[in-house]
Amino acid sequence: MCGRYTVSNPGEILPELLGNDEAFEVAARYNVAPTQVAPVVVAGPDGSRTLREMRWGLVPYWAKDMEIGNRMINARSETAADKPAFRDSFQRRRCLVAADGFYEWQKVPGGKQPFLLRAEGGAPIGFAGLWDRWHGPRGRVVESFAVLTTRPNSVAAPIHDRMPVILSPEGRSLWLDRNGQPEALADLLVPSPASELEAIPVSDYVNSPAHDSLECMQPVLLPTQDSLF
């Protein structure tokens, strides 16, 4: 799964995902957690991309309340097109989740070791996402999203058995294309090349969702690197 991620350099991430040089007043995020609001990119009918801020944890439009979204932070890419909670979004409401890294926890003797996985050098990333719009009591409207996951590549596999779907620049355009056939999207929902990803051990400071500072991303030295792999 993907349970935490980073948007540490929105000034570079958002223009790349949007395909323009427009400046945005979006705060850096070092430890985005479920139920929090974060930036995503959606495409309009004419293909133009726009930035939206949505709640992480997809709440289907038909839900009776928002609590279901707490369990819908991820959607398995292998089954999302068929699952009632994600099926309609897969067909009609796909998005890019702005990021430049994600965290996973590896089981080690005595506990779990957190890692930051990111593109080499911290380059911008666009996760494949799904979104929906829920209408609640008293006119409340909530837009929310889920991150699609896939099997891990060889960098992520020693740490966790799932990873987010990271789209290439070409894949982002295909994913956002409203006229694209869901069947044709299957080739996008695969692990990113291992050569494009690096894993950096970080401290357990990141474990708390209340912590959202650069300290979450700071590398640490492991006692014996070989013992973790």
Image (cartoon, rainbow, N blue to C red):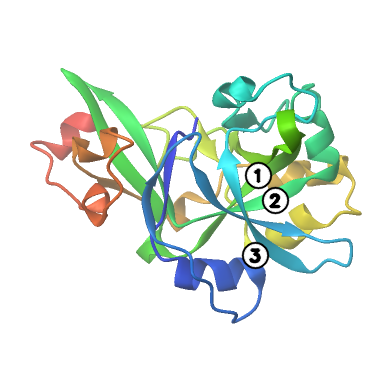
Q: Label 2: which residue? A: 95
- The residue lying at 20 percent from left, 20 percent from top is 111
How far apart are labels 3 and 2 at the CA level?
13 Å
Q: Where is residue 178 in the image (x, y as percent from the top left)?
A: 87, 54
- Between tags 1 and 3, which lies in front? 1
How far apart are labels 1 and 3 at the CA level?
15 Å
Going from N to C along the chain, the mark reached first, 1 or 2, is 2
Q: Where is residue 104 in the image (x, y as percent from the top left)?
A: 37, 35
Q: Are marks 1 and 2 in contact (CB under 8 Å)?
A: yes
Which of the two residues, 84 or 55, is positioned nearer the viewer here? 55
Q: Classify residue 146 as left or right of residue 78.
A: left
Splitting the image into 4 quarters, where does residue 98 fall? Answer: bottom right
- Residue 169, label in figure: 3
| Type of the residue with mark 2 | Cys
Q: Classify residue 83 as left or right of residue 180.
A: left
Q: Position of residue 134 (x, y in %)?
A: 74, 34
Q: In this view, does 96 lie above or below 15?
A: above
Q: Do the residues labelled 1 and 3 touch (CB within 8 Å)?
A: no
Query: Which element is circle 3 on?
Result: helix
Q: Is residue 188 above or below residue 177?
A: above
| Type of the residue with mark 1 | Gly
| Type of the residue with mark 3 | Pro
Query: Which element is circle 2 on?
Result: strand
Which of the two residues, 2 or 52, is positioned nearer the viewer here? 52
Q: Label 1: which residue? A: 129
